[in-house]
Amino acid sequence: MKKIEAIIKPFKLTEVKDALAEIGVEGMTVSEVKGFGRQKGHTEIYRGSEYTVDFLPKIKIEIVVADSQKDAAVATIIKAAKTGKIGDGKVFVSAIEEAVRIRTDERGEAAV
Amino acid sequence: MKKIEAIIKPFKLTEVKDALAEIGVEGMTVSEVKGFGRQKGHTEIYRGSEYTVDFLPKIKIEIVVADSQKDAAVATIIKAAKTGKIGDGKVFVSAIEEAVRIRTDERGEAAV
Amino acid sequence: MKKIEAIIKPFKLTEVKDALAEIGVEGMTVSEVKGFGRQKGHTEIYRGSEYTVDFLPKIKIEIVVADSQKDAAVATIIKAAKTGKIGDGKVFVSAIEEAVRIRTDERGEAAV
Amino acid sequence: MNSPHWRRYFFLLCLCLFFSDFSAAAADSISAAPQMQSTATALPAINTGDNAWLLASSALVLMMTAPGLILFYGGLVRTKNVLSTMMHSLILMALVSVIWMVFGYSLAFSEGNVFFGNPLTHLFLKGVGAAPNPAYAPTIPAETFMLFQMMFAIITPALISGAVAERVKFSAYVGFMLLWLPLIYLPLCHMVWGQGGLFNWALGGKIPVLDFAGGTVVHISSGVSALVFAAMLGKRAGFPREPMVPHNVVLSLIGTGLLWVGWFGFNAGSALNAGSLATSAFAATHFSAAAAALSWAGLEWKLKGKPSVLGAAAGMVAGLATITPASGFVSIPAAFCIGLVAGMVCYFAVSKLKAICGYDDSLDVFGVHGVGSIIGMLMLGFFANAEVNPALANTFKANGVLVSLAGSSHQFINQCIGVAFTAVFAGVGTFIILKIVDKVIGLRVDQEEESVGLDLSQHGESAYNE
Amino acid sequence: MNSPHWRRYFFLLCLCLFFSDFSAAAADSISAAPQMQSTATALPAINTGDNAWLLASSALVLMMTAPGLILFYGGLVRTKNVLSTMMHSLILMALVSVIWMVFGYSLAFSEGNVFFGNPLTHLFLKGVGAAPNPAYAPTIPAETFMLFQMMFAIITPALISGAVAERVKFSAYVGFMLLWLPLIYLPLCHMVWGQGGLFNWALGGKIPVLDFAGGTVVHISSGVSALVFAAMLGKRAGFPREPMVPHNVVLSLIGTGLLWVGWFGFNAGSALNAGSLATSAFAATHFSAAAAALSWAGLEWKLKGKPSVLGAAAGMVAGLATITPASGFVSIPAAFCIGLVAGMVCYFAVSKLKAICGYDDSLDVFGVHGVGSIIGMLMLGFFANAEVNPALANTFKANGVLVSLAGSSHQFINQCIGVAFTAVFAGVGTFIILKIVDKVIGLRVDQEEESVGLDLSQHGESAYNE
Amino acid sequence: MNSPHWRRYFFLLCLCLFFSDFSAAAADSISAAPQMQSTATALPAINTGDNAWLLASSALVLMMTAPGLILFYGGLVRTKNVLSTMMHSLILMALVSVIWMVFGYSLAFSEGNVFFGNPLTHLFLKGVGAAPNPAYAPTIPAETFMLFQMMFAIITPALISGAVAERVKFSAYVGFMLLWLPLIYLPLCHMVWGQGGLFNWALGGKIPVLDFAGGTVVHISSGVSALVFAAMLGKRAGFPREPMVPHNVVLSLIGTGLLWVGWFGFNAGSALNAGSLATSAFAATHFSAAAAALSWAGLEWKLKGKPSVLGAAAGMVAGLATITPASGFVSIPAAFCIGLVAGMVCYFAVSKLKAICGYDDSLDVFGVHGVGSIIGMLMLGFFANAEVNPALANTFKANGVLVSLAGSSHQFINQCIGVAFTAVFAGVGTFIILKIVDKVIGLRVDQEEESVGLDLSQHGESAYNE
Ligand SMILES: Nc1ncnc2c1ncn2[C@@H]1O[C@H](COP(=O)(O)OP(=O)(O)O)[C@@H](O)[C@H]1O
Ligand SMILES: Nc1ncnc2c1ncn2[C@@H]1O[C@H](COP(=O)(O)OP(=O)(O)O)[C@@H](O)[C@H]1O
Ligand SMILES: Nc1ncnc2c1ncn2[C@@H]1O[C@H](COP(=O)(O)OP(=O)(O)O)[C@@H](O)[C@H]1O
């Protein structure tokens, strides 16, 4: 199994989720993160002082999929999340050795 | 070393934490995430309109353990987190190549 | 490529980020987590009752780097995050099989 | 979806309201000439300064409920229950007003027997208009008095909600309140403040119990009912093993500030005019709150090593609840003393008594309002001061002889009777009502609903979103 | 950075203000002797109780805007737009005050033709001082009346902002308001409330439209303008496909509480004294809010299975907006009926009408304020009650003959005329103004700015930080 | 745990309070007959309208402290310090009240020398009752005047807390305030407002400094003390390298709204009656706030490209602080001018002056309140207008000759003297007090405590939980 971690722009979440659901990805876990990258932050003003905010809000999506599904999932994410502008994010893939569904004790690909 | 990631129901956190502490897991990192899975979301009503909320609040627990501790830890989590109802969550295991304790520069299993 | 995950004390974030930027790490993803470890929690008082808070606020930094950059990055994090006091946190390293930059479809080390 | 029932009911209700409107009009037209004048060019008897203060006070007392109390309580619960907790107070602003309009005011304040007034006298508030009711407040329209008192009838049951937060079924809560108000609150209100009420000291009662702004009627009745309700409902899942810490202390502090400010309307408004008695009640209120904040936070500092902010706030509320019955009868230094005691006693009630007895009064309604007002009522027995409020000395007659109600062991006993009666009446009454509601509706949400939170399970909403 | 322009303008403005100050002084000194006395030792005619109530009411109405409305609206938008939404109201507290000072008050309330007053009569508020204006409020300083009315001029445009939240360009918003106030609000205000205004029923108007505290002037004008603005601006990106749920319902509930409390100043203050009419308007306000909360939440309970907390709150606001025109003219049971209807009609306006028509009125300004006040104005045509407000029967003269304006099909038609005129006037006016603003500035932020949120893109801030 | 000490102290305190209560009673009974009447049936001299307004104003001024100021300040700090920041104001509501009750009021307002009053005259507020004090406010009970003034004594030190937020030790803060109030505030209050005070212009002072509602006494004294305190405490760890952005701007905006509303009580209440002078002060307050919001936000728009919401809010507060001393003396256009200047000057004080001087006044107390009120005091020297407040022309006598205090270079010099004296007195006094407190307690938390946050380290709480 593979774990796919994608860092995307927050307003793309719905699109990515729907696209993944369409290709049959049934589970995913999402968290709010802050990203630092080429896309530079912006300036905020508080009571006359300017501050540079380096970190931008991003969404991290984690999905664990069967090896066979990996390429489709990555391609789907990239397609749905792309705006072509800087800050679109990254996708990282790593190996998962074991997966268990807590409710049923199912293991391996049956669990994802 | 192995990294165990468990996605569980929020109200199970205390139980899981206590159970892990009992078998000697000394460190863990917890974050609030939103999950999408078989457990379907619910409907919320705001000013006369209904919205479907797909994402449910979940807790992600991450623990890095020595290879030898892995099975016990996974079993413990599953036992403590199970309610038998849909949405109980998943456990994923992956390999960790290196671990360092920042304070002491200890490396490897001594660090976890 | 390697993924470096570091759990650090929140007030060290700026220092770590700046130190990483200096050695050329261009991207990172940060999230707020709660940690449980040797550093014990504290007591809070609410309306006459005392509660023990086990979980302490921590920051998790994730960076994916080329294999060659890994050692420098880990060393840099450790140096910047160290206070020498309990609770300084940990660094974990794991393997990343694939990385894609969504905007350009670049793959591999070019993407990180 | 298609339910002719409720439409028919609604239609009937409207009809009935129309009818009452016109019948009232007809009734009024009998004495039309003077009445019309009175509404047109405010009666000479109406003092605009007094009316201005009472309108402002009515607004302040409503502000105590919302946003005051909803903030105070809302901040103390966990995130998943904040809306339901706020709803418990908000819905009473609507429900109680209906009851009050239909027969509630009449039951409390029209003439009747020693226990309750005649619910028909002012049915649909007929006859409650521009003309003052000289018995209660001779310089303001009777309608103003009615409004001011209504705000008390709203906040009292709202206080109870703090004890049952995070687990009560919403329908059961509504059902309970629809019974509690007419069966417990309105009679108590009549007995203590109504003309000819059993405990009324100024308008022809039997046992002269002093209660300026609601020690018995408001705080003891709600505090004791809260205790019974909490006990019958059972503890929240996980209590006391799991910490249940306030999800947003900031909200509670804002609420505390608004409660303190609103309480000036509550207590100083209870003078029913803008004269020096209002000022005196205002002052007593302030100094008691200040004192109780110091003693609660001071105790914590001493015993726990740190003065908590929520402790200071809880002390303020305790000081305010405690001085309520005494506010129009005591000097400033006495009010300060009462506040000091309030902070300490309530601190122990909340931190020790609750732990020992093992009930789960989620937001400490009994420990703060119940216990506080009990000691306030009792201390008032000694501190009541005829120089602050001369009526104490020259109003109550026993067997035709003037009796001073100023502080004395004699008056202390009267106060004890009032407290004991209120506690038993409210406690037993609440018990019976809950037995009924439990039968008919069931008091508590199921385990799954409780774990998801009442916001989602009872109201289909979450407080905080993206 | 170096811009002599604005410095010069500022200098000119200051000069101009100085000048007006001194010229006013000079003008005053013509009738100096009595004037000075009047400011020195409050005129015998000034009733301190009335003035106290009107000052308190003015404060309450400002409190409705901030923090009331900014909380209510701020809680309903998404996190990234909360500050900009609050700014929409806050900035009007400043902008409207300037217009009001320079010529606004004069345009609305000095004598003129049936459509507007003379903007020069009270330029820079000259002549608006301690002496009462007997036509409007004989027992309080004219300056108090001016202040009270200003608070209405502030909140009315602020209401509109709810319809355009989350996508309007800030500069366009400011530009729009600078035109909307003098072109729509001030004339309407004169027509309905100004001496000799077209629809004024008590001070020499032609068509006697009853509007106690602002059904036409405030709520219909803002509600209809909001609808037009929302339609011309277009939907928010993603609407209605993506859920746009309130980011913090707690804020909206606090706002609701403050709005209810503040509305007592709005409606009861509109009696312009602290007599029994103020009390009566206070009571009508309260019972309508209570009734509408019940009917809205009740409907939801029936139709959706759960009564939502935000539904109860929305019902309260609907009940308050609906009763506003009627508050000083109807009995309590009538107010209660009006509230019941308000809750139901507004519920359907918000949940069905909007979906059917497909406009994106972000925070339902039209559905609640527009629709609510329309039905309030119309029901008032039947419910107006000369026993509640005797002036209804003995003030308006058509062709020299006293005509009663109490509820009747005749008065209903007058009300219809008032409503229709206001809706068309505000709607068409807003349309034209927006065409101009769109040409000159452009109404809407670009897609990137909208997706980032207005807080950051328009104001360079985020509401919530570490 | 077992500490007989504080129990003994508490017992003594109670005894002492009892005693004072009875002694007061005894003292009163000497002139018992009239006194008792007065409390019974409000003295003929008491005007209920005036008293209603002053009670409402007292409530409004307390509302400025909580929830107004605690919200404004609480929103500006970082999450980990919000409760401690709120506590800084809340605890003063308790502490100051005690000092005020014991001897504070007497020190400020009883007769004495030019610097302070006799602390024993009204020890434990004896003799402060229903009878008016004709020198200060002839139409309201002296007790009302005492309450109103107390609210000023509470908020003034609370303002200081903004400068020391996020790093001051709580015990040091309490210690400082216990000294600052009697040594700085109360004497200043006597000098400016007390009968026979050095700078009193209306009650027999020497140098006639105009200060209607607290430019010197409240804002300059707190602003300068804040500056000194901030400087002596040192910068927050990481300042100015790390951004320290407001954790919740929404809270600050709610606070701003409440401050504006409450300020009507502050300034218009300072008329001490509900006549036309109250109205005039109300108006000046409003227009200055509006103007300053425009000029601050306008400057930002010009210089930074975007008008920030917090900037508009900061401008409002600056406008309010600046007009405070002038509010009862100037015309509306003059107030508007003052506000325009206030917004600009304070903007530069906050954004440039602070950066240049390098002190860390966390929440800009000096830049807004200190600087604002200084320019307000000085501009008042020119703008004071005897048509707005005729007493200016016919009250102050120098060498037996009436001298007009209306705007002139002469009065400007008087104002300069008042400002300079206050700044030096408060600055030096604060310096000395802090030296002592530093010796005895130590001013600042240690590094670890600061990094964890004061909420946890000083009070054992976190604001936001699950
Ligand atoms: N090496 C990395 N490790 C972890 N996260 C990264 C890395 N590089 C980028 N990211 C994440 O991806 C986000 C987008 O990257 P960025 O460089 O801004 O844009 P782009 O992908 O268009 O070059 C960043 O905000 C950060 O959260
Ligand atoms: N393939 C997956 N990848 C990542 N997270 C998953 C995956 N499947 C499930 N999850 C997480 O586990 C949670 C529970 O899964 P769900 O399918 O609802 O229940 P069950 O485990 O009972 O089938 C989800 O909410 C989601 O957070
Ligand atoms: N085995 C582990 N797995 C995951 N996270 C861990 C583990 N051990 C420690 N952590 C994280 O590191 C943080 C610091 O660890 P702690 O034991 O408190 O300090 P130290 O590193 O000084 O021994 C913890 O709060 C937790 O978030």
Image (cartoon, coloured by chain):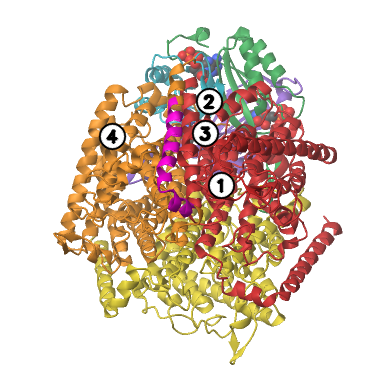
Chain colours: A purple, B green, C cyan, D red, E yellow, F orange
Cα distance in 3D space between marks 2 and 1: 46 Å
Cα distance in 3D space between marks 3 and 4: 29 Å
- Mark 3 vs mark 2: same chain? no
Look at label 1 and name its amino acid: Ala
Q: Which mark is residue C14?
A: none
Mark 1 chain: D
| Residue beneath the point at 52% across and 54% down | E68
Cα distance in 3D space between marks 1 and 3: 32 Å
State the quadrant of the C terminus of chain E. top left
| Label 2 beta carbon within 8 A of ligand 3 | no
Residue where numbered disc 1 is placed = D393
Asked whether the viewer can see residue F135, the reply is yes
The residue furthest bottom is: E399
Mark 3 chain: D
Q: Main secondary structure of the magenta part?
A: helix
The residue furthest left is: F399
What span is colored magenta in the figure?
A: F12-39
Look at label 3 and name its amino acid: Gly
Q: Dot 2, crowdedness within 10 Å: few (<14), some or many (≥20)?
A: many
Does residue E307 belong to the magenta stretch? Answer: no
Residues at discs 3 and 2 in contact (Cβ within 8 Å): no
